Image: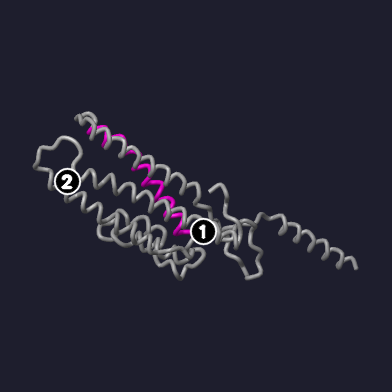
Amino acid sequence: MQGSILDQLGFSRLSVAVSEEPLNPYATPVSGNTPEPEGMGIPSAKGPRTLARWSIGLLILGAVADLVFHILAMIEWTPELDDLSVFVPLPIYLGYFVVFLCWSYRILWNAAQVSPETMTVSPGWGVGAYFVPIANFWVPVKGLLQASRVYGTSSGIILIWWFGGIAVGLSYLIFTLWFLDQLTFGPTIADHVLVASDLGFVVLETIIVLGLTRAQTTLSGSRASFDRTG
């Protein structure tokens, strides 16, 4: 009887120690019956909404700056204005690019937790490929296309946005080289093409970023809620 009581007390202590041990959301479940931490439908997933807002906001700000300087140059071009039209938008676009890469990594990482068999492009490679010649023409968009399949969003608009951007960039380069040996004051055809493409680029990317972000948040809501602080 006394041994039975001690056994019960020992088991009780063990139960208390186990129950008081903090649950590690990053730990691999021991079995399928292991309870999932609340709010973590995808392990350690974080909502990309804040990154999406900053990415779109900076992109719009850069496009507006380009448009303003373009209009001012059409009214009265000066060398000082030409310099400002480069150095003012540049840090804005650099900030946008950094935030967009962070958003892309978050989207790809979370998609890999939902459907690892679909996501053959890893988050690191999907972001790092932007800096690798040749690979940067296809790998980043391939990762976003795979993520769109995971979240059930349209892949057509991603292809239009991506290859349209490449076509505009090449066109701008060609026009710039064409006018390089000509003395020009004020906006050229290349500048008109760039400003017009900026507006289309902003619209398409806003649809894509918000669409993937909303789809991921909706999917996470059906499994469990994402971290709302994003």
Look at the magenta stretch and give its main secondary structure: helix
Residue farthest to the front? 75
Query: Nearer the N terminus, badge 2 or badge 1?
Result: 2
Q: Residue at x 46, y 71 (%)?
A: 117
Q: In screen coordinates, is 89 left or right of 18? A: left
Give the mark toward the camera: 2 or 1: 2
Q: Position of residue 51 (x, y in %)?
A: 46, 47
The stretch of residues the image draws in magenta is 82-110
Seen from the viewer's position, the closer of residues 209 and 191 is 191
Q: Which residue is mark 1?
A: 216
Q: Residue at x 32, y 58 (%)?
A: 162
Secondary structure under tag 2 reads helix
Q: Position of residue 140 (x, y in %)?
A: 35, 59
Report how far apart the C-alphas of labels 2 and 1 lie in the structure: 40 Å
Residue 171 versus residue 68 in the image, above or below: below
Q: Is residue 31 magenta?
A: no
Q: The residue under label 2 is which amino acid type?
A: Thr
Which label sits on residue 176? 2
Seen from the viewer's position, the closer of residues 126 and 68 is 68
